[in-house]
Image (spheres, rainbow, N blue to C red):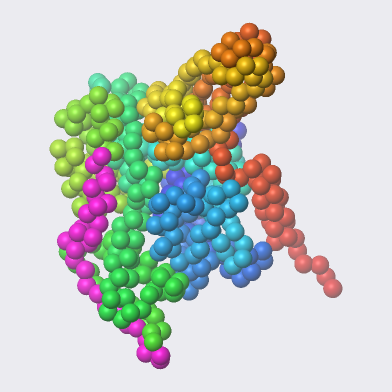
Amino acid sequence: MARIIGIDLGTTNSCVAVFESGSGPRVLTGSAHVRTTPSVVAYTGERNSGEVLVGEKALRQAVTNPKRTILGSKRLIGRKVNAKDVGSFARTAPFRIVSAPNGDAWVRVDDTPISPQEVASHVLRDLRAQAEQSLGEPVTRAVVTVPAYFDESQRQATRDAGTIAGLDIYRILNEPTAAALAYGAHRVRAGRRIIAVFDLGGGTFDISIMSVENNVFEVLATNGDSALGGDDWDRALIEHWVDSIFDEYRVDLTSDPVAMGRLKEAAESAKKALSSESSTTLQLPYLHAGSGAKPLHIERKITRNEFNALTADLLDRLSAPCYRAMKDAGLAASDIEEVLLVGGMSRAPAVQVAVESIFAQPASKAANPDEVVALGAAAHAGILAGDDEEATLLDVAPHTIGIKVGSTGFAAIITRNSMLPVREHKLFATNLDDQDFVEVEIYQGESESITGNRKLGQVRLGGLPRGKAGTVRIKLTVTVDVESILSVKATELSTGKSAQVRITPSGGLSEGDLEEIVEKRRTEAMSVARPPEDD
């Protein structure tokens, strides 16, 4: 049986690994011998005939091809274009973010709208090729990680990206759980241990409180912010520079994609430099043509203290999810025995200070935060394949799931942090005389009103026996499996008639969309592989 690889599909960088019997998980590097791949996709030439570049190749030409180079697409996957954080992302993105017909956030390359799922599929396909080069065999199955706080739409969109890439996503695994497994926290010492996994990546933030005992990893509570990550620190710096340049020169760089691309690159470099240095200097000659024939040359010095001041509001957003997770787990900071750092942004000194303040202890730095999630995914793949039977994972539902009641009310059925898999029932009755169908709308979120939650879909049950209001009763059964995938069944009790659906999130790609994209990819691959005909 072909092996199952583990993939960390990150906002900034991605990584692929495999479990080897007898030696454990290892990162796969392919022929290029790179351990992580930038999650960047670039389209060159015409959309339907040009080459698609992925990783370092795409990153190297990003400044000269900003409108066709897509960075951070994970921040858009499964999201609506009118979401507040998508709007913030769009303000400094060199490429265009547009609305799909169903309101999803897509990108536009030239005149062609492209879904984030299709963008992400190029990264997954590249990682798959990397794995096949390393292993010398075909790869078709993968465990892919997602932020623990991803909702149903984002998880399904990630699955769709795998389908487009020709991968059977065998399991969706939460990133903090994967990281804890890779750390091997259960091997440190005997007895029950309580750990916190603090995962701050390029686009998302998760915190998971876990119990580890007798090779069983049990997630006690999870929380986070799916719109907070290292890209936000970059954006704060970019917006600061854009404002200061406008104040000094009256030049609006947001209308210059090449300049914005160069600022994005400079902001990321400055952020990394300030992790180890007290100051750094931005030097960007010929950043903008300027007014008339006079070009704009920019040089700016920024200190770590100034950078921390600019991003203080982002640091402040880290604490509330941590405290909520500890409260949901029924624990205090003093109960946490170890804090594990995951994600590239966790290297920032200010973030590490914040972690120490929240948990009253310094965090562990025992593993590479850029690789640990992929290694954990590979370890879990080993468990699923029967190659490793050491650990058992018990995860929780990241969000509350319920139904619409009345005009805007929300009734919870499965509460957040319920152990997975979980199944709950709710009885209700018709509210009209001779009502012959019911339609139940399913929502996800923590608000008491549906206006503050996200609609996932609906289930309709028709052909009900006619009767007075309140006399026909329906049992609703809501199930969330180990991958946080949701299914709903409605049953009329007197007849046993039922309707069951696996909830497909409102929005996203339809089956027809997926088939069309996959067929287009297959046709393109065949045209490239076919040798030219002789004249």
Q: Nearer the viewer, residue 484 or 435?
A: 435
Residue 377 visible? The answer is no
Question: Is 442 contained in the magenta span?
Answer: no
Q: Is residue 351 above or below residue 397?
A: below
Task: Report the magenta residues as a range.
Answer: 292-320
Screen quadrant of the N terminus: top right
> Residue 266 sits in which quadrant?
bottom left
Screen quadrant of the C terminus: bottom right
Which residue is located at x 27 percent, y 79 percent?
A: 248
Residue 486 visible? The answer is yes
Q: Is residue 482 above or below residue 109?
A: above
Which residue is located at x 51 percent, y 23 percent?
A: 479
Q: Residue furthest bottom?
A: 293
Which residue is located at x 30 percent, y 70 percent?
A: 243
Report x, y in % for residue 344. Answer: 33, 51
Q: Is residue 173 left or right of residue 493?
A: left
Report x, y in % for residue 416. Answer: 38, 28
Which residue is located at x 16 percent, y 42 percent?
A: 357
> Residue 512 sits in which quadrant?
top right
Q: Is residue 64 above or below residue 524?
A: below
Report x, y in % for residue 278. Answer: 17, 64
Q: Nearer the viewer, residue 250 or 222?
A: 250
Q: Is residue 183 above or below residue 509?
A: above
